[in-house]
Amino acid sequence: VSMWSQVEAAPKDPILGVSELFHADKDPSKMLLGTGAYRDDNGKPLVLECVRKAEKKLIEDAKNMEYLPTQGDNQYISRSLDLAYGKEIGNAEAIAGIQTLSGTGACRLFAEFIARFKKGAVCYVPDPTWSNHLNIFRDAGVETKAYRYYKADTRGLDFDGLKEDLGNAKEGDVVLLHACAHNPTGVDPSEEQWLEISKLFKDKNLFPFLDSAYQGFASGDCDKDAFALRMFKRDGHAMALAQSFAKNMGLYGHRVGTLSIVCASKEEATVVESQLKVIARAMYSSPPLQGANLVSTILGDEKLNALWLTEVKMMADRIIDMRAKLREALEKSGSTMGWKHVTDQIGMFCYSGLTPEQVDRLKDEHHIYMTRNGRISMAGVTSKTVEKLAQAMHAVTT
Ligand code: PLP
């Protein structure tokens, strides 16, 4: 027998599995609406102009390619935190920060940190959530529990359910919140609801962990998309934050992110940071260089930063426009189902309400690919394909 004969094949990842099926399809009009990666109106991946300029600048500056320290590039970390916390940053020295392998790496590092230093704490995750959250906490050995979040009948927030479930959490439990543009539902609490959630966390002494994968990419405005995380900071919570520059700077493959943990003092932050470094050292030793250099260059240069803000808004606006066009085309198609949620939801994803069987029919009869929970990556829709998508959605829902 071979060494690995007893190993069973792993189940396919629900998101990556969709891409595999798509690539095997020979139909020329096939559409991929699975993975959350931005496409321009011709359906092509986009590299931002500010990124191209920063690349040139980095070549001209002829930086070396030495290892970054284990915690990453300190200037990058500080600029990344400024972008997130804005004027609510307060005493930056009391925030432990570490450069991570994008948002996934930030979540994973934090999960490891809880496993080591908050043994027995449960991490509450919204139902539903980005499927990888569950893998991340599982592999770190942290128990997760779901809290109610999405209400199928209203295609909106189950606010009462959320409050009841989190009201039953134990003091010191960790609660994962999507900072904006909840994935997969596109449903976010209103500003008033966020304030109530913050108060509930204070009353129950819960620990907020905000996952911010879409700052600027959701509404087009980096400040607006940071509302929830800045509110938690302003309200004085001990909290943690995962940031990703995959979507908002289009740096998917560069793996640039930040984990920050708001501590009680500078001394505590130094201690926490030292332990984060121990975890990172054994996992990957130090993070990648180029992506952090790009982000730091863009955030640190007035002109490039201004250019980036227009470009991130352009991406957000295209998605918002596609939502409007999809809803309009569905309503014009004669569909009698309500499609208001298509434009009420925010961010890259539209949680369409299509059933798994309807999603299968879209694939089999129309060559349109999405995850079986009915999540449509709006970034994959273009002005040339939106009509076909609407027709197909109408066909499988009547
Ligand atoms: N968190 C959420 C909610 C996401 O939607 C994503 C990406 O889809 C991520 C984190 C992390 O992505 P990345 O690791 O590419 O930064």
Image (cartoon, rainbow, N blue to C red):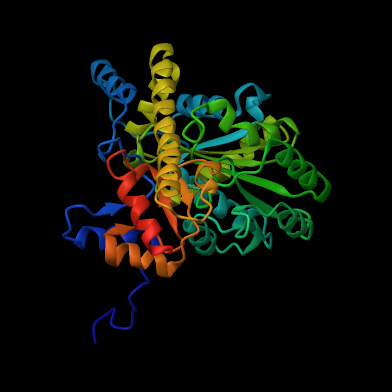
Given residues 349 and 122, the one toward you in this image is 349
Please tell me which residue is depicted at 59% across the width and 41% down the height of the picture.
179
**Image quadrant in which you'd find residue 231:** top right
Is residue 177 rendered to the left or right of residue 246?
right
Image quarter (top left, top right, bottom left or bottom right) of the C terminus: bottom left
Expressed as whole percent of the image width and height from the top left, the position of residue 228 reads 65, 36
Please tell me which residue is depicted at 41% across the width and 46% down the height of the picture.
332
Given residues 132 and 117, the one toward you in this image is 132
Is residue 1 rendered to the left or right of residue 178?
left
Vertical position of residue 215 compared to residue 89: above or below: below
Vertical position of residue 12 compared to residue 76: above or below: below
Expressed as whole percent of the image width and height from the top left, the position of residue 101 reads 42, 43
**Image quadrant in which you'd find residue 118:** bottom right
Please tell me which residue is depicted at 44% across the width and 32% down the height of the picture.
316
Expressed as whole percent of the image width and height from the top left, the position of residue 323 reads 44, 41
Instruction: Single out the residue that lies furthest toward the bottom.
Output: 1
Image quarter (top left, top right, bottom left or bottom right) of the N terminus: bottom left
Vertical position of residue 87 compared to residue 370: above or below: above
Given residues 69 and 202, the one toward you in this image is 202
Given residues 314 and 325, the one toward you in this image is 325
Q: Is residue 248 visible?
A: no
Q: Can residue 84 be seen in this view?
A: yes
